[in-house]
Amino acid sequence: MEKVLVCLLGSTRAHQLTFPRFKQRVLDELNADMALALLIDENYDYANPFWQHAKYRRTVPFLSDFGEAFDRVQRCLCQERKLAAPDWRIMLGINGPWQGGIQSLDPQQPRRGNRGSSASLEFYCRWLLLQGLKDDILDRYDRFVITRSDFVWLCPHPPLSILDRDAIWVPNDEHYGGLNTRHVVVSRADVVNCLNLIEDILLEPSQLYDELKYMNDRDFSNYNTEQFLAHHLRRKGLFHKVKMFPYVMYLARQVDDNSRTWSSGLYEPAVGHYIKYHAEFLTAVAYTTIIRGRADWESGAWRQFDPEPVASRVGSLRYRFRLARSHFLNVCKRESKRIVSALKRPGRVGRFQRFCKRLLQKTKRKFFDRRALNNKTLGHRR
């Protein structure tokens, strides 16, 4: 039997929602150990079950500028290989979500397409995990599952017996012009090249910039981590190994989770939490109609199954209207609670009254100033 290590990157958020199914449908299903590569702050909850169940843990403090993290990794790599450090920030000319979280040293440099994301932390966390695996851990395992804590697993993870060991497996959707980076199943032989994405950015920035610049001429402002992963595997001669399995999980967010995130999602009353990507959710729900256990995976019926018709019925116009309505009502309810809570605090009512008075006076002045200007203009025309 293969020895498996499940690796979580970045954070252990949404554990209240996800851990029970994760343990049953991933850890127990694969009889796997767990490793964490996390960025944490002083408020991190060490009592969460992901931390408690992990066999290996590697953490670093969360940074406001991931450019500093890239600098640290570059110093480490260059010292290790006795190389002069090139200017990796030339890569910031490849605009897009991939560089979210990196602050440019040049304020004149155009920055488009990152939309406030923290996508660059994925490059750093993969390298952080790789450093942990090199500490005599890599040779203990045959297969590595690189994933996230905020997946809700609706079906058991596909058994590794049906996943070719020589292939690199990813879910069959959410590729965004490249390859899905949220979940990867890879063998020991290829795990290093699936984790060292940051090295080419830091050690070969000029060459990589030229490659991506010419590939990305049509959409030079929207390069993402999915495209980076696909290009990286092509550079390493591994892209032909990529295979895909059904999308049987979806990303979720707790109602009270205010942590930074790429997508806040929409509230779904049927499940009682936020769904980050609706299409991902619909696809996972569709696969639950034919995959309920290991036997369903091994039968192979999922290979001919098309989830689109089922997903379309679940995602009908009526359903989407109900989803939007529930989200609107939820936002109204949340904001009304905030207003009521603010008004209950000492002195808030008086300040609110003064605010309304100032607002009324300001509006009145604008009205009369505009009216006077219109009269003056009208008199001039006469």
Image: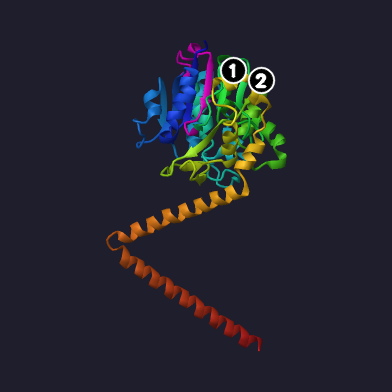
The amino acid type, in three-letter code, at marker 1 is Asp
Does the magenta segment cover residue 36? Answer: no
Q: How crowded is mark 1: few (under 14 residues within 10 Å), some or many (20 or more)?
A: some
Tell me where residue 350 appears, x and y as whole percent: 31, 67
Image check: 112 left or right of 13? Answer: right
Element marked by disc 1: helix
Front residue of 236/110: it is 236
Q: Tell me: residue 58, above or below residue 266.
A: above
Q: Give the range drawn in magenta.
A: 132-151
Tell me where residue 363 appears, x and y as whole percent: 47, 74
Please tell me the numbered disc located at residue 190: 1
Q: Name the residue that disc number 2 marks.
A: 241
Q: How crowded is mark 2: few (under 14 residues within 10 Å), some or many (20 or more)?
A: some
Tell me where residue 23 appears, x and y as whole percent: 44, 25
Please say if the residues under marks 1 and 2 sit with CB atoms less than 8 Å apart. yes
Front residue of 160/166: it is 160
**Dot 1 or dot 2, earlier in sequence:** 1
